[in-house]
Amino acid sequence: MTTKKPVSEESDESTPLTYDPTFNGPIKKRSCTDIICCLLFVIFVAGLGVVAYFAYTYGNPRLLLYPQDSQGNLCGYGTKKDKPNLYFYDLLTCAKFGPGVFVDGCPTPQVCVSHCPNDTRAYRRGGGLPDQCDPDTFCSNPGDDTKTCKQKIDSDECPAYVLKSEAVLHRCVPEVISGKIPNFDSLVDKEDKKLNGTSLEAGEEFLRQFLKVKEYSDKVVQDLVATWWMILICLVAAMVISLLWITLMRWIAAPMVWLTIILFLGIFGFSCYYCVRGYLNTKDTEQSFNFHLAIITLNFKQSSFWLTFGIISAILLLIVLLILLFLRERICIAIALIKEGSRAVGSMLFTLLWPVIPFILQIGVISLWAAIAVFLASVGRGEGVSKNNFTGLTDEEIQRRTDSLFQKIPCDVNVNNSGSDICGIIKYGGDEYTFYLQIYNLFMLFWLVNFFIALGQMTLAGAFASYYWAFTKPKDIPTFPLLSSFGRCIRYHLGTLAFGALIIAIVQLIRVFLEYLDAKLKAAENKVAKFFLKCLKCCFWCLEKFLRFINKNAYIMVAVYGKNFCTSAKNAFFLILRNAVRVVVIDKVTDFLLFIGKLVIVGAITTAAYFFYDGRIPFLTEYQPNLNFYIIPVVVTALGSYVIAAAFFSVYDMAVDTLFLCFLEDLERHDGTPEKPYYMSKELMKILGKKNKTPKAE
């Protein structure tokens, strides 16, 4: 008589398992889960399509390339086509505004001009001299004789002074940036305060840094173009090393963990001894340590110093000893599961390539979001769109201006009743309504990215669950476990994936809103509001981490049992709660091993790249490129190596987590009898002192 292999039924997980000799992994009798959320997801995706169509139809990203003056006109476009450059009235306000220049621009009146000033002159003259606004080329309304020069300066229609400038990216940048400081003795600002070169240099500091980015960007691009194939070789090497490391994990996991614990005990044991000896030698003296940190000098009495660090070392040593004494068995279980995870990945090597697919899908979503955001940002930008620009214009003039900008609008606009006409809303209120569309676009970015992350996790969970629940390995492992798992996700569990992703997306959107509030409150003096905002940010950060943990384990339970999200999340949570200590140990041991693996791979590849680009590898000097910043390809190599290592180890991490939950289910549901045999490996059964009983011969 042979032992039959159990299979879980379609019924609730609390019911006993039935048995079927054709069992081959997670349950196959499934039904669609979380259908309502699936329909909601489809509706929102369709809504994103509508937003994308709107953005493409009414947006024009080319308009973002033109600088915009204070009236909403685009310099070099439309009626300002003959005035391609932007001139800033008072650069001193840039210094007062600080880093906000990079986000909102310099908060001073700006005007489109045909050319930048070729000399320095004062429009407002101090000492009781009359103001002179001739020529008024750099005024917002040149040729306007209805106001005096003083009135124009006071109403920000004319600058108090102009500086000799040159055009950089169609912005007039004073020559003071390049060190050509002219004589400022005759210049005063709008409030009759005398100017000097130092104050102007401070005023344009942030503008100067902003414009220099282009120069450095060009050099960075040149370096990347020259070294792209070398970076690619390094990334391929990172892939090979990651694969080898995961394969070797089944043999090196135990030595690494135990060696680390032994070294930890040795280090802190020696630390206790050294600190106690130091305390005994200095307790009757007045000797002290002096630590110099920048402008601060710290002074410690030697006896107190050695005593403090001796106590800390002793406490840490005691904690490690207690962990070793009481959690030794659980550490052994963690190591065994890590080894089993390595075997599972080794038996399904295609799982290592699987993260590429969700990654490509996420890149596609991010690209779509960026494209829609750029098109939306250009809606309502330009001549005739700013509400301030409509002042004093007839309806026909407004119609003519907007039509010159939005040539692709396929409907007629009733200017007098634009509130009831969608085209009127787009043309005359586009900059307001597009703000809400940008929020919707951002929300869909979060939802779709988390959806594809969930798809990747559940697909891997289904494949590794098939491995664990195969009674005779590798005979009972499905032929295409990864493809089968992916098919189950698409066919039955799209709603569950959307549900879990929606929860994370909502939390992420709230966190973005809190970051926005924090940025707005930086200049505020209300410390209580700042404190509560910091607390909220911390709480929602923790909430997102917790929900990601719950979601990941819920997807594993869905992959195994095929239940809906809430039921799976509840069962996974209470299963983990019943085995909290085991969860903590396996999680920390796995994190430690993955951290060591990433550190080794990224460190090795980055170090090799650094020595190569720095010319320290003699036999490769002939291939060394001539670079502006050799650190750029090194950084790109480091980041790329980390992404690759993280992708490979994410598969390994998912394997360990899936096998762990299956192991806990195995322990709770089976007792080793012929009717309920264990599915765990022989090593795990040996650690736990369990075994499958041999059926009696009839």
Image (spheres, rainbow, N blue to C red):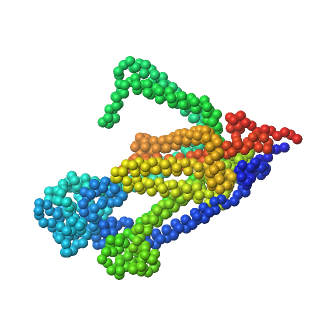
How many discs appear? Answer: 0
Looking at this view, is 379 or 241 the one in front? 379
Q: Is residue 453 visible?
A: yes
Q: Locate the C terminus and report the quarter of the image it occupies.
A: top right
Q: Position of residue 14 (x, y in %)?
A: 72, 49
The reply, left or right, for residue 431 in relation to residue 665 is: left
Q: Position of residue 440 (x, y in %)?
A: 49, 63
Instruction: Classify 481 as above or below 259.
Output: below
Looking at this view, is 461 or 602 the one in front? 461
Q: Quadrant of residue 181?
A: bottom left
Q: Residue drawn at (41%, 45%), measured in percent from left and top?
A: 613
Looking at this view, is 13 or 333 the one in front? 13
Of all residues shown, which one is farthest toward the left?
128
Of all residues shown, which one is farthest toward the right?
698
Q: Residue drawn at (47%, 27%), measured in percent from left and top?
A: 311
Q: Position of residue 654 (x, y in %)?
A: 60, 47
Q: Residue drawn at (14%, 59%), measured in percent from left and top?
A: 186
Q: Quadrant of residue 401?
A: bottom left
Q: Position of residue 354 (x, y in %)?
A: 59, 53
Q: Locate the N terminus and report the quarter of the image it occupies.
A: top right
Q: Is residue 408 visible?
A: no
Q: Residue drawn at (42%, 79%), measured in percent from left and top?
A: 417
